[in-house]
Amino acid sequence: MANAQIDEKIHSLISITTDTERLEGIKELMLYDVLDIEREAFSKEFDIIVFNYYKKLQEYYKANYTEDEIDQLLSFYDSPAGKKLMADQRELLHGNLLPNNDLNARVKEIKKDK
């Protein structure tokens, strides 16, 4: 298989399994606390860190999974069970399924104060 094809498949897998919305939310929360004169530099640095994270994920999948395994993962995440799993994971990460979660309560408190 051509390198570009597996790279595209891995990119799709990362897009499905990584909560990019949450990363953007984290960035926005952090930008709120950064001085106006530092925001542009912080934003660029954050974007570089996220880009490098995605690059490392890409390298990890490429080194540890075969094309067939990547295809199986993509098929799973495209199935009803895979979609349900990802929706549940996002709910858990956002704390919506654990209303008494201490971390979730603290984040809500911080947001309320701002």
Image: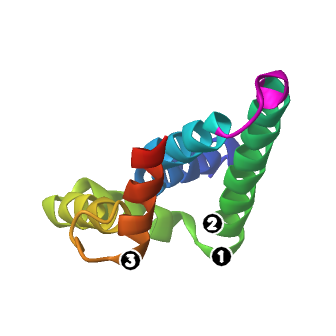
Disc 3 designates what residue? 102
Q: Position of residue 65 (x, y in %)?
A: 59, 72
Label 1, secondary structure: give it. helix
Q: Name the residue at 27% across, 61% down.
A: 91
Quarter of the image for residue 60 reads: bottom right
Q: Which residues are magenta?
A: 33-39
20 sits to left or right of 84: right
Q: CA distance from mark 1 to mark 2?
A: 5 Å
What crowding class fits label 3: few (fewer than 14 Cα within 10 Å), some (14-19), or many (20 or more)? few
Disc 2 designates what residue? 61
Q: Is residue 86 above or below residue 20?
A: below
| Contact, mark 3 vs mark 1 (Cβ under 8 Å) | no
Mark closer to the chain start, 2 or 3: 2
What crowding class fits label 1: few (fewer than 14 Cα within 10 Å), some (14-19), or many (20 or more)? few
Q: Is residue 79 visible?
A: yes
Q: CA distance from mark 3 to mark 1?
A: 36 Å
Label 3, secondary structure: give it. helix
Q: Is residue 8 visible?
A: no
**Residue 64 has which mark?**
1
Please, what is the three-letter code of the amino acid marked with disc 3? Asp
Q: CA distance from mark 2 to mark 3?
A: 33 Å
Label 2, secondary structure: give it. helix
| Contact, mark 1 vs mark 2 (Cβ under 8 Å) | yes
Applied colour scheme: rainbow
